[in-house]
Image (cartoon, rainbow, N blue to C red):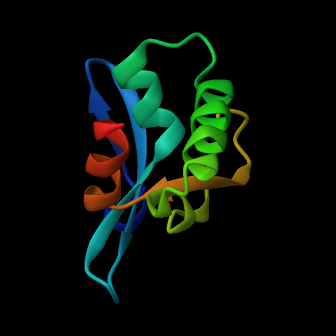
Amino acid sequence: MNKETSIKLFESKQVRTQWDAEQEKWYFSIVDVIAVLTDSENPQIYWRVLKKRLLEQGNETVTNCNALKMLAADGKMRLTDVADTEQLFRLIQY
């Protein structure tokens, strides 16, 4: 694991991150951040429901979220919704 694909710890929970050198910004796994902030038993479902509600309201933050391949719990690289710092702050506001 290197700077470009590192894991951050927050209250002993992992948050997968990826560095974009071209844009010079970090991307964070939204599902991991939701797990940290909500203590949800199933952060994937929490994100799916929240994303649907935000899209119905016309929220552009969700539209601008990208998906990147990140290492999943099963050891495979899987597409994961990610957000940069600014997008995360907007999502947290909702």
Above or below, 21 relative to 36? below
Residue 11 in view in this figure = yes
Q: Residue furthest bottom?
A: 22
Above or below, 29 relative to 48? below
Above or below, 25 relative to 83? below
The residue drawn where x is 55% and y is 57% is 58
- Quarter of the image for residue 21 reads bottom left
Q: Is residue 57 left or right of residue 56?
A: left
The residue drawn where x is 34% and y is 58% is 87
Q: Residue furthest front?
A: 57
Residue 72 in view in this figure = no
Q: Is residue 28 left or right of residue 64?
A: left
- Quarter of the image for residue 53 reads top right
Q: Is residue 44 left or right of residue 6?
A: right
The residue drawn where x is 28% and y is 72% is 25
Q: Position of residue 85 (x, y in %)?
A: 27, 57
Q: Nearer the viewer, residue 11 or 67?
A: 67
Q: Position of residue 71 (x, y in %)?
A: 61, 49
The residue drawn where x is 31% and y is 85% is 23
Which quarter of the figure is the N terminus placed in? bottom left
Q: Position of residue 47 (x, y in %)?
A: 59, 34
Q: Nearer the viewer, residue 41 or 20?
A: 41
Q: How many marks?
A: 0
Q: Position of residue 11 (x, y in %)?
A: 26, 18
Which quarter of the figure is the C terminus placed in? top left
